[in-house]
Amino acid sequence: MQVVFSIIIPTYNRAYIIWKTIKGVQEQIYPYWELLIIDDGSTDDTQKVVAEYQKDPRIKYVKLPHAGSQTARNEGLKRAKGSIIAFVDSDDYIYDNFLSVSLEHFQKNPKKIFATSNYNRRLEQFDKNYKLVDFIKSSCVQKPTVSLEDFYLRNVEPCGTGIFLKRSVVKNGIKWDTKTKIFQDWDFILQLGRKYPNGYMHIPLVLFEYCRRFGIDGITSKATYLDWANGFEVIYQKHKEDPLMRGQTWYPGQVDKYKALQKESYSGKSISPMYEYFFTEK
């Protein structure tokens, strides 16, 4: 079987939604792909759900001990056979032109090494019983033209889904940082940017729906304001010497902002971090 794309989906306890993500892959216009579902030690029915789709020989399932999504993504990188690798989160949904459009852009720009695309966004709020109580669905919120510098200056919000790269990157030692608690996708793009400053390509088309859920067990819900502050600190300290970081205005302001919010949350002056972003968007 010809494999042009390796699609890597890390997952953890997403039996309730991963079927939709898999269907999005199967409905691709471009058929030459393999799907690597890397299970980060799920304790729910994820394996059983995935098994229902494994009549399709292009779908492969690997279960690991629970160690975090970055470890799962790195395992996918080691196993990928396609010349182009695409990352998809297990609760997002890719449109049927996700692969065909990205391939067209790589073919037109053969010197480019990695790319990101635009996306639509959906925010969902759940109660303590994991029941959906509210949601916001928005259209594309990205800039029509995005440069690599925009990621360094925090002018755009990175997303784990919709990161494409040539497999040659793996040979050069690029991998997901397993020590980064949040902003893993941002850090990964900045790593690529440091190694390939002229290799970035923006695909100015909406190719998937990104879903951020509040009130359940994802990173967004679990993170405290201090986690966000520390996340900004880690990113800056790790990449502050990168040439494209010059001119940034988000540090130390974002660190100070979230440290202040952490203090306010302890005193009851601010709402829980898992809902602050959701209500701000509304």
Image (cartoon, helix red, strand yellow):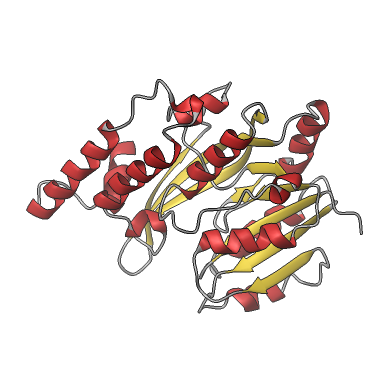
The x and y percentages for residue 102 are 74, 37
Determine the residue positioned at 27% across, 39% down: 255
- Pick the residue in front: 95 or 255: 255
Instruction: Tell me how many marks there are.
Output: 0
Quadrant in which the C terminus is drawn? top left
Q: Is residue 40 visible?
A: yes
Q: Position of residue 88 (x, y in %)?
A: 62, 52
Rendered position, 51 above or below 280: below
> Which one is nearer the viewer's eye here, 271 or 9?
9
Say above or below: 41 vs 114. Answer: below
Q: Which residue is found at the position 92% from the left and 59% from the top?
A: 1
Residue drawn at 62 percent across, 35 percent down:
117
Q: Nearer the viewer, residue 129 or 65?
A: 65
Residue 196 picture location, percent across and down: 64, 33
- Which x, y percent locates residue 213? 42, 54
Quadrant of residue 64 within the rendered picture: bottom right
Q: Nearer the viewer, residue 57 or 76?
A: 76
